[in-house]
Image (cartoon, rainbow, N blue to C red):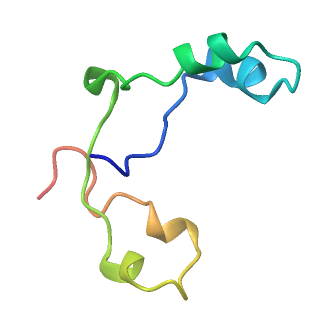
């Protein structure tokens, strides 16, 4: 998606945050994140309100294997 945020690998955090980092190296980090490393799960509808800022917003709605 054209508004997809950049997702960095944890090993790249320090380089990304280094103010002296080479611009070409930083551009190289702007690549699609491997979808095999992502996971999806249902969450509560409380995420639909900006008033809610709690860990429950990202807690899985069901435990793995449950429905």
Q: Is residue 21 left or right of residue 67?
A: right
Q: Is residue 14 left or right of residue 27?
A: right
Q: Quadrant of residue 46?
A: bottom left
State the residue lying farthest toward the right.
Answer: 20
Q: Position of residue 39 (x, y in %)?
A: 29, 37
Task: Give me the residue at 53% from left, 83% from top.
Answer: 52
Q: Is residue 33 left or right of residue 63?
A: right
39 vs 12: above or below: below
State the residue lying farthest toward the left.
Answer: 67
State the residue lying farthest toward the front.
Answer: 24
23 vs 55: above or below: above
29 vs 56: above or below: above
Q: Name the foreground residue: 12 vs 26.
A: 26
Q: Position of residue 4 (x, y in %)?
A: 38, 46
36 vs 60: above or below: above
Q: Position of residue 33 (x, y in %)?
A: 38, 25
Q: Quadrant of the C terminus?
A: bottom left
Task: Give me the residue at 34% from left, 23% from top.
Answer: 37
Q: Name the foreground residue: 61 vs 35.
A: 35
Q: Quadrant of residue 26?
A: top right
Task: Give me the residue at 87% from left, 27% from top.
Answer: 19
Task: Give me the residue at 32% from left, 47% from top.
Answer: 2
Q: Name the foreground residue: 4 vs 46.
A: 4
Q: Position of residue 62 (x, y in %)?
A: 25, 59
Total count of labels: 0
């Amino acid at each position: 998606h054209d508004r997809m945020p950049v997702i960095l690998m944890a090993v790249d955090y320090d380089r990304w945050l280094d103010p002296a980092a080479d611009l070409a190296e930083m551009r190289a980090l702007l690549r699609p994140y491997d979808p095999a490393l992502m996971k999806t799960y249902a969450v509560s509808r409380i995420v639909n309100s900006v008033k809610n800022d709690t860990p429950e917003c990202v807690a899985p709605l069901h435990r793995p294997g449950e429905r």
